[in-house]
Image (cartoon, grey):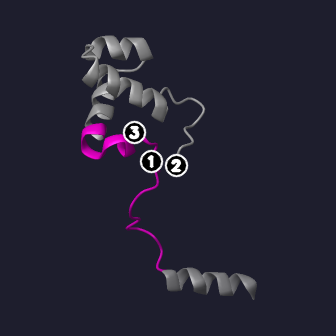
Amino acid sequence: MNNPHKNARTTPHIRALIVDRAIRQQQSIKDIAHTFGISRRTVYKWLARYREAGDAGLESASSRPHASPRQMPKQWVELIQKMRLT
């Protein structure tokens, strides 16, 4: 997913610049955060994701939950759909 919302401060390209400035150019986290208008915590977040997954970690990820424990059982959903049609 590479389609950030319209108010996103960072894109995968900007995230790569953040990583480059922090790791290769050895700029301070404070300066990087100030330059891109983000928090230091956000800079650390993207650095951690880069260290964990490389360039793939800088891509936008889905915010959809991995599980829905309170989701209605499938057979109930099917029964409700059938009842609505009759």
Vertical comparison of 15 with 82: above or below: above
Please, what is the three-letter code of the amino acid marked with disc 1? Ala
Q: How dense is the environment of label 2, judged by Cα within 10 Å: few (below 14), some, or many (20 and up)?
A: few
Amino acid type indicated by mark 3 = Leu
When asked about the image quadrant of residue 47, the answer is top left
Dot 2 or dot 1: first in sequence order is: 2
Q: Which residue position is annotated with label 1?
A: 61
Q: Is residue 60 left or right of residue 25?
A: right
Which x, y percent locates residue 68? 41, 65
Label disc, if present, on residue 31 of the rendered structure: none
Q: In the rendered structure, which amino acid carries the disc numbered 2? A: Met
| Nearer-the-camera pick, 8 or 31 | 31
Residue 46 forms part of the magenta stretch: no
Query: Contact (CB < 8 A) between labels 2 and 1?
Result: yes
Q: Position of residue 22 (x, y in %)?
A: 28, 21
Marks 2 and 1, Cα distance to the nearest angstrom? 6 Å
Which residue corresponds to mark 3?
58
Name the residue located 47 percent from the left edge and 50 percent from the top edge: 62
